[in-house]
Image (spheres, coloured by chain):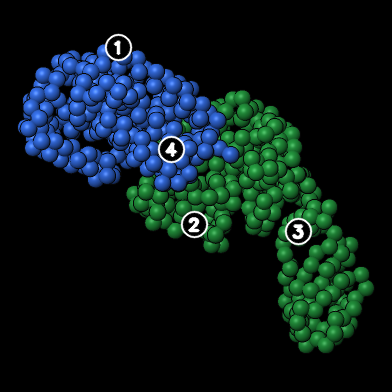
Chain colours: A blue, B green
Amino acid sequence: MASTNWIGYKTIVRKEVVRILRIWAQTVVPPAITMTLYFIIFGNLIGRRIGDMGGFDYMQFIVPGLIMMSVITSSYGNMVSSFFGAKFGRHIEELLVSPLPSWIILAGYVTGALARGIMVGSMVMLISLLFTRVHVLHPLITVSVLLLTSIVFAMAGMVNAIFAQKFDDIAIVPTFILTPLTYLGGVFYSINLLPDFWRGVSAFNPILYMVNGFRYGILGVSDVGLPWSYAIIGVFTVVLASLCLWLLHRGTGMRS
Amino acid sequence: MYALEVERLAKTYASGTQALKGISLNVAQGDFFALLGPNGAGKSTLIGIISSLVNATSGEVRVFGASVQRERSRAMSYIGLVPQELNFNQFEKPLEIVVNQAGYYGIGRKVALARAEKYLRQLQLWDKHDKPSRGLSGGMKRRLMIARAMVNEPRLLILDEPTAGVDIEIRRSMWEFIRAINEGGTTVILTTHYLEEAEELCRNIAIIDHGKIIKNMDMKSLLATLDVETFVLDMRESLESVPRIAGMDIRMRDESTLEVSVPKQKSLNALFGALDAKGLHVLSMRNKANRLEELFLRLVDKGAGA
């Protein structure tokens, strides 16, 4: 059974990676263009007038946030579009009638989303090198926060895809929840600039902890304590993994 | 041990529709089994539960002794499913579709590629293996689903209307393929609306109607219960009225065509003799429907009237 699971897992991952590369113009190119524009407009043109933030020039300050933003969006987007597409086209049944257990299906799809997150994140990192110097201070923290955040948003994408009934339903969460939380999650600013009230409100935004944990890994500065970043990411990982497994096991939205 | 054991299986959907009302059924290993019933009878729900796409409300299904409810992975490893609706990714190529399915059953890529080629060739799809599957014809798409279902070389192959919308030539070549699979030892369960197909291929049969099994027996015994057969006769002469022959029900379709119901105990010679005595000559004769179709309609009509 272990060998069946391992081959099944590799098959799902391979299928997902082939899909990402087949539609590269939809999966990899758009974040590259968007992030290049962010670097030019916010980092270069506006950033020069802002000056330092957190002890770094503004361009350097926003690099970790922009990488994290693209990883979050890509991981979520990959999972929600691929899984909902499989559900909508009914080819998810290929997996449902197979001997593969739910956790392998979850692991395969999450790894596929992670692959896209890493591809896009690495590309944004390379683009940032065209605009500024980036020196990664704590590689282990940088990589671990990036991977765990990608996993969290991949699983959040799966929950969205499981409950979605139509294509509109997979656009609602990214538009009305994910994008505002990401923009307000300290990608472009330090929350120390905010009045007390809004700083307190920001503390309820989980993306703040992910962006700042990643920023700490690269630059060594953060608006929140690193243990808090890991704790928040850890809680979301456990809760979302349990929820995904429960929904897959029940066959919610897939088995009648 | 049976290939399939269904015990007091019931399914009530959230809408309140009772699709299965506690049915029980056994399919022997190596059997070619027909599962028939009118639309909405519960066939697809039963197949859905066997293949774990539908959750049963109560009862149990075992595939080669493995419970679908309690040992899902083991039970699924024995099954190959050809569903009624197309359910593959139309943006993928046939070879990718079949090889990926093999991977989900734990079959390594090298073996998967060899098997995919074997089944795509047998089903005359190899020349399309590298073309997008959305460009395949309806018949090719159905054959692709059969190749996909065969790649794990299942012990139980379930075919839910595999030949729907397929032309007669391809349908017959699919019959040959499926018959050979069965002769190789694979148990086959077939649902179809072409009753000629079921009569031609299957050894045992269950008829479901309104969520209950109304007949479950071997095909020969079932056909033997047909007490009247109806024939259509094309006559040489133009008829003005319906000829009367004792013990036979005769109806006129048009001035030169008769429909005659012949009881099993009467011979056709008696019919021809009686017509000849009246100066009537038969040019050609055919069955109004095949024997299974005639029985099926009677059984289902009886069920509807009950």
Which residue, given by chain and number where applicable, does mark 2 sit on?
Answer: B139
B13 lies left or right of B180: right
How far apart in space, not on screen, are marks 4 and 1 (Cα)? 31 Å
Which label lies toward us, 2 or 1? Answer: 1
> Which element carries disc 2, helix, strand or loop?
helix
Q: Chain of mark 3?
A: B
Q: In percent of the image, x 74 and y 49: which residue is there?
A: B209
Which label lies toward us, 3 or 4? Answer: 4
A92 lies left or right of B261: left
Q: Residue A5 lies in what quarter of the image? A: top left
Dividing the image into 4 quarters, which one contains the N terminus of chain B?
top right
Which label lies toward us, 4 or 2? Answer: 4
Query: Which three-letter amino acid code belongs to the residue tagged 4?
Result: Ala
Q: In percent of the image, x 59 and y 25: which residue is there?
A: B71
Disc 4 to disc 2: CB gap under 8 Å: no
| Residue A188 in sight here | yes
Which label lies toward us, 3 or 1? Answer: 1
Q: Chain of mark 2?
A: B
Q: Earlier in the sequence, mark 3 or mark 2?
A: 2
Q: Position of residue A38 (x, y in %)?
A: 16, 37
Q: Which mark is residue B297?
A: 3
Disc 3 to disc 1: CB gap under 8 Å: no
Compare residues A123 and A91 and report the one nearer the observer.
A123
Q: Position of residue A183 (x, y in %)?
A: 26, 33
Q: Chain of mark 4?
A: A
Query: Which three-letter amino acid code belongs to the residue tagged 3?
Result: Leu
